[in-house]
Amino acid sequence: MNGETPPTPLRERFYRRERQSVPAARAFTHAVLDAWGIEKRADDITLCVSELSTNALVHGAPPGRGFKLRLLRDGGGVRIEVHDSGTGTSRLVGEGDADESGRGLLLVAALADSWGVAERHPGKVVWAEFADGVSAAAPPPRGWRGPR
């Protein structure tokens, strides 16, 4: 390794229960993915962070609390986790549901390779993984010295 420090495979940040937390979570995600050199599916990952963060604020973070966004890199894949302390459950909206809201998890299910919900005390963790097609920008060919 040419003296460079490898990117940290875990990045996390806590957000308070306030409106500007969702755009801040998107900006944080964009910065982390950029630092990791991840270009493919970066928009999908960022959109899923936005949806899961919104769900945490609306349904999972009681007043006076917040949520934690965690981004993990494992090989070529990325896992996002949103931790909240609420008692609500996360579920997909079914075809018979008339609600206009609550469709964020449908987007997450469509964009991520896998997703799920895990218990934590208190609350839950909603996660999504992006394995296929997520990779750092292709390394330059061997012997390439860049523009002169």
Image (spheres, rainbow, N blue to C red):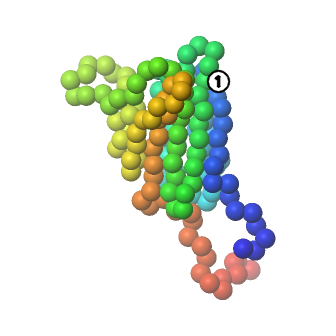
- Please tell me whether residue 131 is drawn above or below residue 87 in the rendered image: below
**Crowd class of label 1 (few under 14; some 14 to 19; many from 20; radius 10 Å):** some
48 horizontally vs 97: left or right: right
Residue 117 found in image quarter: top left
Q: For residue 40, say whether it is visible.
A: no
> Residue 108 location, x and y as percent?
40, 40
Identify the residue at the far bottom of this view. 143
Q: Secondary structure at mark 1?
A: strand
Residue drawn 66% across the image and 82% down it? 144
Residue drawn 57% across the image and 54% down it? 73
- Please tell me whether residue 122 is drawn above or below residue 45 in the rendered image: above
Identify the residue at the far front of this view. 121
Residue drawn 32% across the image and 31% down it? 92
Residue drawn 47% across the image and 19% down it? 87
> Residue 61 location, x and y as percent?
55, 21
- Please tell me whether residue 63 is drawn above or below residue 22 in the rendered image: above
Q: Return the residue at label 1.
A: 16
Between 123 and 44, the one lying in front of the other is 123
- Please tell me whether residue 87 is drawn above or below residue 39 in the rendered image: above
> Residue 63 location, x and y as percent?
59, 13
User: Where's the C terminus, which quadrant?
Assistant: bottom right
Between 120 and 58, the one lying in front of the other is 120
User: Where's the N terminus, which quadrant?
Assistant: bottom right
User: Label 1 sits on what residue type?
Assistant: Arg
